[in-house]
């Protein structure tokens, strides 16, 4: 019996090769997209899952309430590390985590390598796979542990235990011995550092940091084996609130909390929690591919359903004869669903290959995230594939199977039953297909418009003509600046302690009874000019003015707006409850968070040259590459033991633009695929509808109907379907695009009238091109041939 079912299936497929090919290819694309979505989802699910003790690990975080708003910070005061270790025995293992961007030197070669400073319990708490060495040697302050990737860069080998390497941090050179080599942590890990060393080295490298200073922060993890003791530990942590709040009156901690390591990376992304660890991918990056894949798969399934119903008229006699010969309805249902499942199986096989191709394309979009496929060792994925197979098979084949198998054989064999073309169900499916396709087109156009909007967005400073390099102090700044002045292509040079995209700090500021937090940066002479900040009121700082250093500030328009100042010049600001500052200038708003988060008010202070750590260079855009090369050349002569660290300012904005561009690519892909699948579905229905109505068309032509009239008659119902789909797709697109953009950025361009008009016109144009020739050929056919055939 199974053999007969298979033979019938193959014969049916051979009679409808074109339509079967369309459906197999469409389903394969949908399944391929589902495979990418699965591994993208898996990447998020397994984030930090390789750490064996993850369920026993907690981060000590601080909950702060300010102006009625609570926010969780993934930091703890630095002295709490030793305090917890000494006084809370239920926290069986404790480690702090801080970092620096030092370099490593082997012989005369310099290499970049981020360093993490941790306590000896670190490798006992977290899971690292060691290739060589003993993790216990982390107790030795003179030892360093390298990733296999960094070890190969430094020594071209991973067998390097006992070898010497020089840590270069500014002007400090420190000889370290390699104690071990670990396999680089996966991209789905919170720890991305290339090397680890004992925490005491942090005090040597950051000389201004003191171990008993509650103003300094660290990321603090504890291992708790007995979960029943968590309430006790939580209560014991609160004794340190008083120490913190005495020292940090500007940062009052409401509560210290034990933040579970499981799910920490995802929560940090959602809540924008500050920490020294890596966040998981944004929720939009996790959910958007899954939504896209489901939509494409639905369109392909709707295509399959429509095609099955439309071509069923060719099999009516087969159904009637089989029923007369004794076939039961359940057998016919199994036959038709089996045929659909067989087609879906073919699509699944092809989809596996397409999935690999799409996976490579997906990985090409992102720098830090590389998805890898693994099938045989992944039972969850195998269940997923089986689920997709049966989902598509049952969704696409159930309705046609039950609908067609229910006909009475008498009506079929007498020729009274006519089936094919369209019915209410197929029209609804086609409408949904085109609504989804239009949604994809609307999204792709909207995100393209948004990418242009964000590229042209005025962030309040010159992002295209600036290079920033980092030095240790004012003397290094002076030396480097003098060397750079030789280059005539440099328009201006400025120094600062902070800048708009690096090392700024936040503090509460007051005016009368109103208080809020503001971003603060300390800058030197010509900073506004070099960075391209626009002064809209007042003046710049006076060079070498001691008064300006002590009490003058320049504020942004947002800060003036927050205090509701119409005339901000001369207004007094109270900082740290004791320092009185006076506004001497106002600049255009500066978007220190880019377009990701809400614009913060900012205050600019004047600092002495001895505090400079930034060298800021402005040059014409067309000369910027040459100027950067010149800066690197001079750097190597002045600072031979340090890697050149200059970077273009617009590199800070690359992440936002990359995300925007990649989303455009994803939705363009979705739009193209969805439109192709919907257009082929329309082509299938129109083609089979024309076959069904050939006699009607012939009679109309004999009676004098023109080609235009016949074209109108054939197309009317499809035009109505497209019109309804346009309303549905535009309505959903309006809300969905806004929802998705709002989950990614705070500043974006939403859909416009042009977005919807262009999308609808494009949809109608593609549809017209798809079926135009077919309809025109049918309308132009000689009626004699049609009627003689009848």
Image: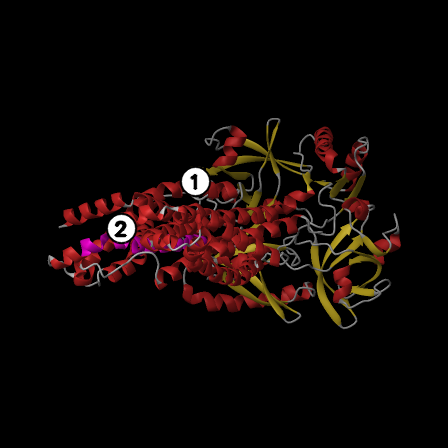
Q: Nearer the viewer, residue 443 or 182?
A: 443
- Along the line of sight, the residue nearer the viewer: 159 or 285: 285
Say left or right for 735 vs 311: right
Q: Quadrant of residue 464?
A: top right
Q: Nearer the viewer, residue 369 or 516?
A: 369
Residue 164 seen in this snapshot? yes
Q: Which residue is mark 1?
A: 130
Q: Nearer the viewer, mark 1 or mark 2?
A: 2
| Left or right, 341 with reference to 177 | left
Give the vertical position of 107 relative to 60 (above or below). Answer: above
Residue 746 horizontal/vertical position (percent): 62, 59
Is 292 contained in the magenta span?
yes
Point 32% across, 47% down: residue: 784
Mark 1 or mark 2, earlier in chain: 1
Res 790 label: 2
Q: CA distance from mark 1 to mark 2?
A: 80 Å
Q: Residue furthest top?
A: 108
Observer-nearest of 511 and 377: 377
Q: Position of residue 330 (x, y in %)?
A: 18, 61
- Left or right? Give the position of 573 relative to 784: right
> Tag 2: Cα neighbours inside 10 Å, few (<14), some, or many (≥20)?
few
Please report the residue visible at 41 percent of the width from the left and 43 percent of the height from the top: 372
Q: Which residues are magenta?
A: 290-319
Q: Position of residue 116 (x, y in %)?
A: 56, 45
| Residue situated furthest front in the rendering | 703
Q: Residue 586 shows which numbered tag?
A: none
- Magenta stretch encompasses residue 282: no
Q: Residue at x 48, y 33 (%)?
A: 161
Query: In terms of secondary structure, what is the magenta stretch mainly?
Result: helix
């Amino acid at each position: 019996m199974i053999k007969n079912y298979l033979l019938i299936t193959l014969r049916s497929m051979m009679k409808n090769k074109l339509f079967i090919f369309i459906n197999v290819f469409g389903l394969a694309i949908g399944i391929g997209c589902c495979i990418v979505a699965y591994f993208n989802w898996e990447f998020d699910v397994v984030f930090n899952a390789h750490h064996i003790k993850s369920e026993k690990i907690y981060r000590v975080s601080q909950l702060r309430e300010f102006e009625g708003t609570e926010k969780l910070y993934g930091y703890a005061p630095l002295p709490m590390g030793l305090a917890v270790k000494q006084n809370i025995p239920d926290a069986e293992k404790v480690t702090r985590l801080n970092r620096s961007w030092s370099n490593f030197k082997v012989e005369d070669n310099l290499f970049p390598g981020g360093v993490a400073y941790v306590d000896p319990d670190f490798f006992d708490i977290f899971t690292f796979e060691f290739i060589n060495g003993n993790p216990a040697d982390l107790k030795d302050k003179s030892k360093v542990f390298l990733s296999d990737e960094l070890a190969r860069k430094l020594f071209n080998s991973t067998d390097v235990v006992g070898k010497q390497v020089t840590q270069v941090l500014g002007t400090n050179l420190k000889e370290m011995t390699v104690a071990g080599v670990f396999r680089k942590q996966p991209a789905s890990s919170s720890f991305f550092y290339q090397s680890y060393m004992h925490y005491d080295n942090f005090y040597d490298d950051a000389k201004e940091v003191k171990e008993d200073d509650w103003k300094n922060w660290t990321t603090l993890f504890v291992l708790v084996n007995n979960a029943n003791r968590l309430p006790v530990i939580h209560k014991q942590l609160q004794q340190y609130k008083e120490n913190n709040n005495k020292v940090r009156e500007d940062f009052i901690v409401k509560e210290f909390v034990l933040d579970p390591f499981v799910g920490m990376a995802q929560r940090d992304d959602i809540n924008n929690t500050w920490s020294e660890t890596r966040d998981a991918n944004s929720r939009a990056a996790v959910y958007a591919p899954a939504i896209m894949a489901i939509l494409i798969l639905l369109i392909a399934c709707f295509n399959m359903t429509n095609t099955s119903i439309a071509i069923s008229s060719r099999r009516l006699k087969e159904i009637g004869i089989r029923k007369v010969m004794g076939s039961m309805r359940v057998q016919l249902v199994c036959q038709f669903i089996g045929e659909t499942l067989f087609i879906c199986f073919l699509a699944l096989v092809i989809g596996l290959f397409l999935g690999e191709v799409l996976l490579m394309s997906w990985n090409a979009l992102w720098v830090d995230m590389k998805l890898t496929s693994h099938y045989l060792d992944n039972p969850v994925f195998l269940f997923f594939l089986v689920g997709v197979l049966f989902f598509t098979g049952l969704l696409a084949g159930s309705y046609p199977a039950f609908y067609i198998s229910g006909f009475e054989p008498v009506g079929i064999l007498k020729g009274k039953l006519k089936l094919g073309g369209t019915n209410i169900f197929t029209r609804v499916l086609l409408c949904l297909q085109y609504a989804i396709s239009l949604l994809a087109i609307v999204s792709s156009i909207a995100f393209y418009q948004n990418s242009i909007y964000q590229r042209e967005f005025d962030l309040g400073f010159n992002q295209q003509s600036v290079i920033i390099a980092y030095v240790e102090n004012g003397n290094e700044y002076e030396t480097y600046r003098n060397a750079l002045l030789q280059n005539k292509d440099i328009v201006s040079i400025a120094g600062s302690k902070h800048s708009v995209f690096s090392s700024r700090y936040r503090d509460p500021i007051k005016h009368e009874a109103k208080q809020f937090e503001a971003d603060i940066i300390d800058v030197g002479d010509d900073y506004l000019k070099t960075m391209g900040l626009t002064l809209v009121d007042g003046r710049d700082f006076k060079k070498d003015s001691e008064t300006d250093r002590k009490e003058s500030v320049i504020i942004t328009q947002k800060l003036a707006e927050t205090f509701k100042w119409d005339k901000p010049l001369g207004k007094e600001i109270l900082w740290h409850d004791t320092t009185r500052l006076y506004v001497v200038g106002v600049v255009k708003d500066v978007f220190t968070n880019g377009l990701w988060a809400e614009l913060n008010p900012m205050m600019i202070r004047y600092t002495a040259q001895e505090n400079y750590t930034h060298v800021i260079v402005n040059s014409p855009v067309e000369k910027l590459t040459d100027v950067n090369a010149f800066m690197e050349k001079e750097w190597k002569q002045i600072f031979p033991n340090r890697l050149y660290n200059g970077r273009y300012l617009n590199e800070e904005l690359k992440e936002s633009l990359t995300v925007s561009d990649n989303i455009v690519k994803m939705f363009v892909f979705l739009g193209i695929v969805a439109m192709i699948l919907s257009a082929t579905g329309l082509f299938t229905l129109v083609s089979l509808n024309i076959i069904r109505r050939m006699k009607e068309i012939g009679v109309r032509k004999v009676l004098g109907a023109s080609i235009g009239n016949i074209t109108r008659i054939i197309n009317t119902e499809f035009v109505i379907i497209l019109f309804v789909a346009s309303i549905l797709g535009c309505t959903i697109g309006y809300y969905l695009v806004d929802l998705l953009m709002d989950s990614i950025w705070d500043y974006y361009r939403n859909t416009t009238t042009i977005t919807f008009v262009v999308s609808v016109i494009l949809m109608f144009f593609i549809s017209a091109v798809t079926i135009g020739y077919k309809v025109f050929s049918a309308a132009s056919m000689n009626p004699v041939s049609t009627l003689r055939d009848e």
